[in-house]
Each structure stands twice: as structure tokens, then as C-alpha cells.
Image (spheres, helix red, strand yellow):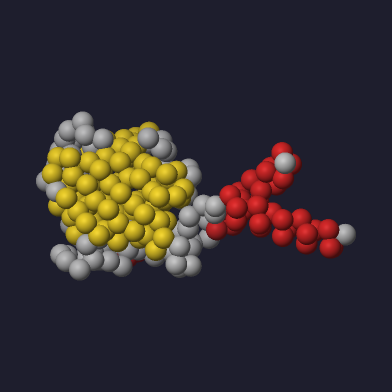
């Protein structure tokens, strides 16, 4: 069994690596309900191309929020939210905004493990008023550029701290996770985010089935 699990892990790793070796389509959260407030919340769903769904919940500060059927389309310059690994920007109006400047922990929770999570950032800070997010996972800045409110930079002061002055762009978390938390200690007029994934981590049973198929194919070749 030890060797079998080891082979499953290798296959899973190879699958995830191949999925991120080039730009792949991303599916973004659709918020179904949003509650404003210092202890706000939201619930939503990410529907993947194979119709697999990932439930998403958010808890933390909510200044305001938008579902796809209401509000302004803020992700209006798609190239800012694309990269060598992320094929497409959000196409819906969904967004959660906050002011920051408090010690409230913001947390996203996923109904199943996800990897290479993308977080799209809108209007992060302003000229003369840089802000920051400090996450419990390290990330990489995939892209930044002009956005709905301007063209300020996104920066990274540590492996898990994002900074910005009117920044727009997208960051990626390579870790496999079921939750992501962060703090926003500096206040500003408001800034917003949404999240997306390229796929969910396969269930263990699916990986075992794939491993079995690979072993059978290998034996046949021999």
C-alpha cells in the first residue's frame, strides 16, 4: 500500500504540474449571498468546466459586494488579470470590497481542496496611501497593470505580504488548500477582490483509479 500511495502522489503531482505549465482557463466564484458589515459573510460556488462544483464561503469585513446580476463590471481590462499561467480574467460582476484598517481576519473556505488559487485584486490602495494584505500562505504576483480606477503597482514585501498603491492585478497561491486567511491592517476608501481556480484536487478514490489504470497500462506494455 505504501508504494501504491507513493505512486498516486507522484501521478497527482505530475497532473497538477502539467495543468499549470501553460495558461489554463480559470473559473471564478459566483457569489449567491453577501452580508455587509465588520463581521460580514458571503456564500458562493465555483463551477468548473467538467461541471464539478466547489462551494466557497467568506467571513470577515464586507464594505459591499456584488453578484453577477448587479452593479458595475470592474474587471474591465482583461489583460491585467491574465498571465502565462492564467488564461482568462473574470467575466462576471462578482466582487467583495472592504476598507481595512482593523485586525479582523478575513477567511475564504472551500468545500474541497484547491490548488493554484488566483485572487484578482481591484484598486488596492491609492496614491500616497499604500495598503497591504498579509496572508497565511505564500503567493506570487502573476500580473498587474491598468484597472478600473488607475494604474498603480502591486508589490510583495515578503513571501506572504501584498502591497499596493491603486494596484490592480492577479496573484496566485501554489499551495493546495481548503482555506485562505489574511489581514488588512491599513484602511483606505475601499478595495476589492474575487477568486478563481483552474480545477479542484482530485478525490483520493479518483487518484487511486488513475494509478490503477497507469499500472495496468504499464504491465501491458511489458
Measured along the vertical axis of the image, is residue 199 above or below residue 40? below
The residue located at (15%, 64%) in the rendering is: 71
Measured along the vertical axis of the image, is residue 5 above or below residue 73? above
The residue located at (21%, 34%) in the rendering is: 104
The residue located at (66%, 57%) in the rendering is: 210
Q: Quadrant of the C terminus?
A: bottom right
- Residue 27: horizontal and vertical position, in percent? 39, 62
- Looking at the image, residue 176 sits to the left or right of residue 151; the answer is right
- Residue 73: horizontal and vertical position, in percent? 21, 66
Residue 17 visible somewhere in the drawing: no
The residue located at (18%, 44%) in the rendering is: 40
Residue 43 visible somewhere in the drawing: yes
- Residue 9: horizontal and vertical position, in percent? 64, 45
Q: Name the outermost residue toward the top.
A: 103
- Looking at the image, residue 101 sits to the left or right of residue 13; the answer is left
**Residue 218 or 159: which is nearer the viewer?**
218
- Looking at the image, residue 211 sits to the left or right of residue 60; the answer is right
Q: Quadrant of the N terminus?
A: top right
- Residue 52: horizontal and vertical position, in percent? 45, 62
Amino acid at each position: 500500500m505504501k508504494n501504491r500511495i507513493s505512486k498516486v502522489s507522484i501521478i497527482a503531482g505530475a497532473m497538477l504540474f502539467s495543468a499549470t505549465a501553460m495558461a489554463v482557463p480559470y473559473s471564478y466564484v459566483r457569489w449567491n449571498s453577501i452580508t455587509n458589515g465588520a463581521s460580514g459573510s458571503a456564500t458562493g460556488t465555483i463551477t468548473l468546466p467538467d461541471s464539478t462544483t466547489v462551494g466557497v464561503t467568506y467571513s470577515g469585513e464586507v464594505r459591499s459586494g456584488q453578484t453577477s446580476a448587479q452593479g458595475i463590471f470592474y474587471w474591465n481590462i482583461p489583460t491585467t488579470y491574465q498571465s502565462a499561467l492564467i488564461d482568462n480574467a473574470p467575466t462576471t460582476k462578482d466582487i467583495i470590497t472592504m476598507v481595512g484598517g482593523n485586525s479582523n481576519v478575513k477567511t475564504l473556505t472551500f468545500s474541497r481542496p484547491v490548488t493554484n488559487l488566483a485572487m484578482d485584486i481591484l484598486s488596492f490602495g491609492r496614491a500616497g496611501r499604500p495598503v497591504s494584505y498579509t496572508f497565511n500562505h505564500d503567493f506570487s504576483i502573476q500580473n498587474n497593470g491598468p484597472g478600473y480606477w488607475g494604474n498603480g503597482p502591486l508589490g510583495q514585501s515578503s513571501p506572504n505580504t501584498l502591497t499596493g498603491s491603486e494596484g490592480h492585478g492577479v496573484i496566485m497561491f501554489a499551495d493546495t488548500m481548503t482555506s485562505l486567511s489574511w489581514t488588512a491592517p491599513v484602511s483606505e476608501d475601499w478595495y476589492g477582490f474575487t477568486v478563481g481556480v483552474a480545477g479542484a484536487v482530485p478525490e483520493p478514490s479518483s487518484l487511486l483509479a488513475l494509478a490503477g489504470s497507469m499500472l495496468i497500462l504499464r504491465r501491458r506494455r511489458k
